[in-house]
Every structure is written in C-alpha cells, then in structure tokens.
Image (cartoon, helix red, strand yellow):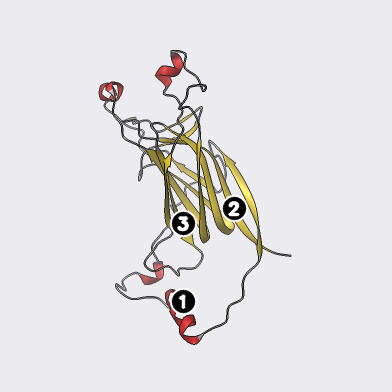
Amino acid sequence: MKMERAQIKNPWRQGHVGEFSEAEQEVVRMAESHTPQVREAYTTVTYQYWAPFNYDNVHVELGRTDPYVGAEFNEDGVELDVPPYGAITIEEKEPIVAVTVIGSACCPPGFVLLQAEPLEWKYPRSGVKMRVENLWGEHLRIEPWRKGLDEGYRDAGMSSATFEIPESRKITIMAGSQMNIDQLDIRNMRHDAHYAIRIIRVTVKRPVV
C-alpha cells in the first residue's frame, strides 16, 4: 500500500515564519498561569513486524533499484538504500510511544534514523526526529560467505536501536552504515553503506482500565 512518509513540519504553521501556533505556546502559557498538572497512567502493547514487512499498515521504499546500488530484499532482511532514498513507514490507529529497530549493517558502525508525525503539534523548534549511531554487528558480504565464512565470524551480528517518542500516529525509519570503499566497490562503482532491517517493534499507548 502506498503511504506518505511521516511529516515532521507543523502543517498548521505553514506560511507563518517566526510565529508559534496556539498549541506550541502551551508550556509557557501553563507556566505563567501556574496551571496544576496531573500525572498520566497508561499501559502499552507492542506490535512486532518482520521483514519483508508485507503488512497493510506498512510501506517499504527500497530506494534506487535502477541502476542497482544494493537496496534489496535478502536473507538478512530489508536492505534499504541510504537516506533519503530508502525508508519504511508504519502507521498505527493507537498512539505510538516507542519504536525498536533490529538489524545489521553492511559496513559497521551503522545508524538508524526515525521521523515521527506527532498527534499534537507542540514542538515548534524540534521536530520529532531522532538518530542512533555506532551500531555494531554486520551481515557478511556475500563474497566472503561464498568462500566459507559464516555467522561465527567475529564481526557478524546484529544491533538494535530503541526510540522513546512523543505520541505519534506514524513513523518513518531510514538507516545506513559507513561509506568505506574497497576494491570491490570500485569495481562495482557503488558503495556498501546500507543497513538491513529484520524486525521493527512498535509500542502503542492504551489507557489503564
């Protein structure tokens, strides 16, 4: 299913450069009026999605495939093209409050980017954008695999990135790894700076009954 990526810019503030919307002024307004606040209790449910992510509420964009630059579905998951080309977008009916991405880098260290579309646009100078870096663990390149190396190799492994986010309706994940060129990359005329995503866990908020 075609799905737009999570937007990170307040749609209610378009054309109002340098101004804040009413919702974006909430903190200052409540501080000045000494409005009492009540802590909130809620429970959570986590949905688990597995590659290749053939779900009605998930949209996968591999990225550039013509010419081929390495983005593909393979045995280790969904190998996304480098940002901003490759992306996975998930939309939930309940408020999303946390996301975990599990996968492996082509060339560690890897990184995972998250963009989220909040339920309430209350963050005027800091969109819901997060990044986790220095993710170690790689899936072996196919050439050494075919020559006999396997998952017992010292650098072969997975990594995970966890994000705690404001309540959001939609999230978009992008990922990659370092652009370290070797002779094979020069011969192929493409780098191997991708990240293969195997599992995405999305945690949603539910009221305490």
Which quadrant, please, contains the C terminus? bottom right
Give how far across and how far down residue 16 sits, in percent.
32, 74
The label on residue 199 is none
Give me the residue at 42% from left, 67% from top: 123
Characterize the local packing of mark 2: few (<14), some (14-19) or many (20 or more) Cα atoms within 10 angstroms. many
Answer with left or right where residue 21 lies relative to residue 159: left
Graded by Cα atoms within 10 Å as few (under 14), some (14 to 19) or many (20 or more), the crowding at tag 3 reads: many
Residue 134, compared with residue 5, is above or below; it is above
Q: Which mark is residue 203?
A: 2
Check disc 3 and report the residue beneath it: 116
* Residue found at x 62% / y 59%: 205
> Which quadrant of the structure image shows residue 41?
bottom right
Q: Which residue is mark 1?
A: 27
Q: Which callout, 2 or 1, points at the residue further toward the start of the chain? A: 1
Identify the amino acid type marked 2.
Answer: Thr
Q: Earlier in the sequence, mark 3 or mark 2?
A: 3
Q: Secondary structure at mark 2?
A: strand
Q: Earlier in the sequence, mark 3 or mark 1?
A: 1
Residue at image x 36%, y 44%?
83
The single residue placed furthest to the bottom in the displayed view is: 33
Say which element carries label 1.
Answer: helix
Quarter of the figure with residue 11: bottom left
The type of residue carrying mark 3 is Ala
Query: As displayed, is residue 190 above or below residue 124?
Result: above
Q: Nearer the viewer, mark 2 or mark 1?
A: 1
Side of 41 where 22 appears, left or right: left
Q: Residue furthest right?
A: 209
Amino acid on which the number 1 mark rests in the picture:
Val
Number of disc labels = 3
